[in-house]
Structures are given as C-alpha cells and as structure tokens.
Image (cartoon, rainbow, N blue to C red):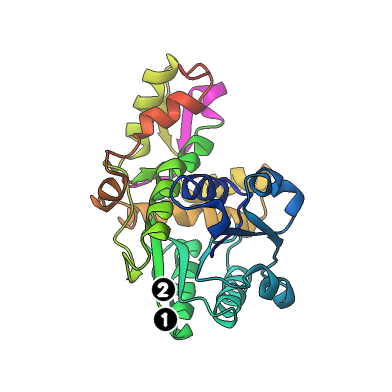
Amino acid sequence: MIIVTGATGQLGRQIVERLLTRVPAGRVGVSVRDPRKAKAFADQGVRVRQGSFTAAADLAHAFEGASQVLIVSVDKMGEEAVRQHRAAIDGAVAAGARRILYTSHMGAGASSHFQACRDHAATEGALRASGVPFTSLRNGFYAASAVQFLGHAMQSGQVVLPADGPVSWTAHADLADAAAVVLADEGRFDGPTPPLTAAQALTFDDIAGIATEVTGRTMTRTTAPDDQFRQLLVEGGAPVEVADQLLGIFAAGRAGEFAAVDPTLATLLGREPIALGTVLREQLPNGEGR
C-alpha cells in the first residue's frame, strides 16, 4: 500500500493521478483532512482515510498497512511546519512503512536565506533520525509561484519586484510525474535526490520578456529595494512575517540557491520538462491557452 498525504492539494492530487497510471488503485491510499474532497479517488478504488498531521490517532488509521508513505510538505513555514512534518514521519514509522518519501525543495539547507528551505532541511534531519529508509524529493521552485509574482503586472505592465537571481522554475505537473515514477520504482533514490528542475534557470528580466511574448502586452521589469517591497506588501495587508518570508525568496535567489539546472527530472520523465513559457501561456490572461 502506497499512501500519499495532502492528496486534495495542487501537487498531491496530481501525484495520485499519475500514480494511478502506474499501479493498481487497490495499492494506493490517500490521507486527507476532508475525505469528501477525495471522492473522485474513492470512486476509482483508492483507499481514502481522514488524516491530520496534528492528530496521531488519525495518522495511525490513515497510514495503516503502508509500505511507502509520501509526505507532501504542508503550506506553512517555521516551527509549525517542521512539527507537523515530524508528526507525519512518526506516524509513518509507527505504521511500519519501509520507506518514507517527502516533497522537499532544491536549496534545502540550514543556512538558506529562505525560511521554507530551512524547514525542509530540518525535516530531512528528522527523516535521517527516523531510522527508516527515506527519499527526499528536492523539487525545483514551483513555476506557479512565478505566475503569482506576475499578478499585478497583468494590469500595470510593470514587474516590480526585488533584485533576484536565476531560478529553475519547474511545473507542478512534471514534479507530480516524477514523484509517481519514484513511488512506483521503490528505492530508486535513497536520501535526497539531485535537484528536480526544469532545463533553464531564469531571472525576472527573462520572465518579463517571456510574458511579453505570450500575452502580447509589454511587461517591464523594475527593481524595488527590499525595504520598499516589504512596505508595499504590509500596506497591502500582508503580515510582516509573511512579507519577510517572501523577501527571503529573493535573497536566496540572489545567493544562487535556486540556480541549479539538473538532468535528473528529464531522465525520470523520459522527456524534456515543461518550459516556463508554456506555463505562462496556459495561465496568464491573453495567453494562447486562455
């Protein structure tokens, strides 16, 4: 039994969909906070059970009989994220899983400028300490985040962001495919994987040019000082902590933490990864996919 957590989220859902093309539905289980949202999987024969990283009893039931557990990282940062990940690891160990997998991030490290990468490093430490073989999927930076950063630019034509560095923006769909491949081929990676990235690392200067091409609207990249950008975020309603976390992405980018380009993802997929231009074309207004 392969258990996937967070199976109603953007990444977890796609992982289960891809996994079902590789293994029988009877071998797949999902651990979700609201089983009603996973009805489509239940209808296909997937075992659906309620599971919360904050309730050990839930996890014991959700992970029952697991041979592998894929822990999809939570949408939180800081100690709360690490605490929930540790609870999920403990639950997988208690269930007798022979391998634990985890959706980590390229650049994971205790000294990263980005809080999430420090959290991923702490979680990888907990995996090492668990005594169970593990695979840490060091995913490239989600291309969907680049789309979000372009949000205001679609109205203003101005990409106003702090100074950045090259980032290997990688599509959710590709990372989901890769996770399914690794789950279906148990033990293919032991410990952290190489960075699972797209074929190019791009700056927001590059992205502004691509967005101009795919939307037909001129996008101009303007650099905002960190303090000014933080102030804009706070004035827009973001908590100071969240503003600082977002700034950490740009500080890490400037330090080259997300610049790696590695062929491992393409090897897993058996094809070239989806380019950021394709993602923008599908998701930005006035792109050809809209």
The percent coordinates of residue 107 (x first, y second) are: 36, 61
Q: Viewer-nearest of labels 2 and 1?
A: 2
Location of the N terminus (image quadrant): bottom right
Q: Is residue 41 left or right of residue 27?
A: right
Sequence order check, earlier mark of 2 and 1: 1
Does the magenta-highlighted stretch encompass residue 153? yes
271 relative to 17 in the view: left or right: left
- Residue at 66%, 69% (x, y): give it: 53
Is residue 148 or residue 239 the one in the foreground?
A: 148
In the picture of the structure, the residue carrying the numbered disc 2 is 134
In the picture provided, is 71 more to the left or to the right than 84?
Answer: left
Tally of marks = 2
Q: Element type at marker 1?
A: helix
Residue 231 locus on image (x, y percent): 60, 47
Residue nearer the viewer, 205 or 235: 205
Residue type indicated by callout 2: Phe
Position in image of residue 271 (x %, y %): 27, 39
Q: Does the magenta portion include 123?
A: no
Q: Is residue 82 above or below residue 131?
A: above
Disc 2 secondary structure class:
strand
User: What residue span does the magenta drawing correspond to?
Assistant: 152-167
Identify the residue at horizontal 39%, vertical 68% (top origin).
Answer: 135
**Vertical order, 103 against 83 (above or below):** above
Q: In this figure, which residue is indicated by the disc labeled 1?
A: 128
Q: What is the quadrant of residue 206 in the picture?
A: top left
- The answer to the question of whether label 2 and label 1 lie on touching residues, with beta carbons closer than 8 A, is yes
Q: CA distance from mark 2 to mark 1?
A: 8 Å
Position above or below: 223 against 93:
above
Q: Quadrant of residue 156?
A: top right
Which residue does the image show at 70% across and 72% down from the upper left?
Answer: 61
